[in-house]
Structures are given as structure tokens and as C-alpha cells.
Image: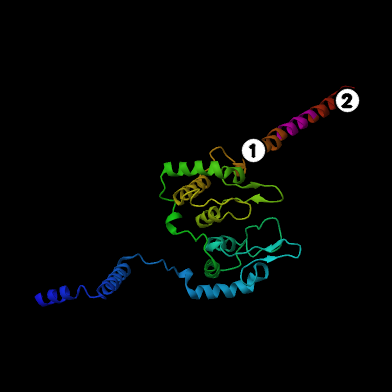
Amino acid sequence: MRYLVRTLSTRRRHPLAGLFVLIGGLVIAGALYSAFAPKAATAEETSSRDVEAGRDLFLIGCASCHGLNAEGIVTVSGGNYGPSLIGVGAASVDFQVGTGRMPMAQAAPQAPRKTPEYTEEETRQLAAYIASLGPGPAIPSEEFLEYEDLSAEEISEGGEFFRTNCTACHNSVGAGGALPSGRYAPSLYDVTPKHIYEAMQIGPQQMPVFGDDVISPEDKRAIIGYIKAVQEQPNYGGFGGGGLGPVADGVWVWVIGIGGLVGFAIWIAAHGTRSTKKVKGAEQ
């Protein structure tokens, strides 16, 4: 030990001593970082095999509109035949393909929800390929989709967020509504929590984007809890009329309620007139 100390002390002024100390420090720092740094997330959907399979699916079913490299296709008149998908993220693909909106059956102002053309595995592969082209919103993790354990206060806060940001288009209970130019806000009934979350992340079609800097993941989870809680509530007042609001309820009252009463009154009046004529004829 004494010999080692003497050796180090005699060579500490060597011209290369500083270089060796620097290299040693870097090696030690690298080893410590490798041992204690958090591992990068390596989900199954981002594997190279999924990316290759997703590209094959894309070339067959999507490239005719979105281009061979998802760069988009511009029409001769300068319009957008198929938008670029670079940077839209895996969440956009999972929403559009998972809800059957893509591929579109025909050109329309808005892509309607329909039965998906691709399986869940194929949708995951397509999402992995598009995600590999550029950074974008990722598919939400399960922790932000669980709403059963939310408290009544959290659900109430979710309702406040929903009524502030969403009811103008989707109605206060998520029943949907009409929009200009042949578009509409779709109903949120029977929509999975994942797709509701993704819609807020990506802003599909005419919907605005509600990123995490606008509505936090916890608040998005509360909104999902509110939507599901409203849909599970019974109609204590009887027939709900679809929950479309006071205008629709008023139509039901006028057409069915007052309209039925007017029709019944007319029937009574006509029946009474015929009875009077018969009595007068009998007296003559």
C-alpha cells in the first residue's frame, strides 16, 4: 500500500496524468449512468418488426391517398387529396383507423365512424410505422384511461371542463350535434376511453386540439369519467328524448304533447257535431 501511494505521488506530475484522470472520470461516469439511468420505454408497438409490417400495410391500403412515404398528395388544382402523416403520431392513427374513419369509403365533408377495416394488431403496426416517421402524440397509457376509481369531486371537475370546452359541439351529455358545411360533432356514446382521450390529443377533423399544456392528462381522465357517468345515469323524468337539449325536448312537447291534445279536441268536436245532427233529424 505504501509502495502504491509512493508510486502515485511520484507520477502525479507526469504530462499525461491529467489525460488519464479525465479518461478515468469519464469511464466511471458512463458506468454509473448506465447502471442507474432509467431505461427508455420499449413498447411492443414500436419494435422494428411492427414498423416493417406497418409500412407494408400502409403501402397497400393508405399510400394511394397519403403518398408512398406518407408525405401527402396534392391535387392538380392545388388542393390536398391526402394530408401528410409525418408527425401526426401513433395516437392519430390509432384513433382514425381504430374507429373505422380511415380508410374513407368515399369523399365527404367528414369521415364517419364505422366498423374498422383493420384488426387491433394491424392498427398497432400502422401506428408504429407512422410514429417512426416523426414525433407526435403517443397512444395514451392505461393509467389515464381508468375512470372507475374517480371520486365524485373529480367527476364534477371533469364535468366543468367538458361543459366549458366541449358542449358547444357535443351537447352537455355528449349526444353530438350538427355543424356548418355538412359536418357534425359525433355522439360520444359507446366511444372507448382511449379514443376519447386520443381525440382530445389530436383534434380530428374540425375538433380543436387539447394538448397536455391546455388540459392535463389528469383532467382528461376526469372528463372521460364525467362522460361515462352521464351516460350511465337513468332518465328519472321518463323518456329522455336522446338528451339533445331543450329545443329537442320542446319539439317533442309540441308535436306529441300539444299536437296530440289538439287532435283529440278536434275529434271530440267533430264527434259532437255528428251526434247533434242525428238528434235533430230524429226529432223532425
Q: Furthest-left residue in view?
A: 2
Give SS at disc 1: helix
Quarter of the figure with the C terminus: top right
Q: Nearer the viewer, mark 2 or mark 1?
A: 1
Q: Position of residue 109 (x, y in %)?
A: 70, 55
Quickly name the residue at label 1: 249
Give whichever of 267, 160 is nearer the camera: 160
Q: Position of residue 14 (x, y in %)?
A: 23, 75
Q: Furthest-right residue in view?
A: 284
Quickly name the residue at label 2: 281
- Of marks 2 and 1, which one's residue comes earlier in the chain? 1
What's the magenta bit mostly, secondary-structure-wise? helix
**Region of the chain picked out in magenta, as a range:** 260-269
**Magenta stretch: includes residue 262:** yes
Q: Residue at x 73, y 62 (%)?
A: 78
Give whichever of 257, 80 is nearer the camera: 80
**Magenta stretch: includes residue 254:** no
Q: Is residue 257 above or below residue 242?
A: above
- Scheme of image coloration: rainbow
- On the image, which quarter does residue 252 sit in? top right
| Amino acid type, residue under disc 1 in the picture | Asp
Q: Residues within 10 Å of mark 2 (few under 14, many from 20)?
A: few
Q: Residues within 10 Å of mark 1 (few under 14, many from 20)?
A: some
Q: Residue at x 30, y 66 (%)?
A: 36
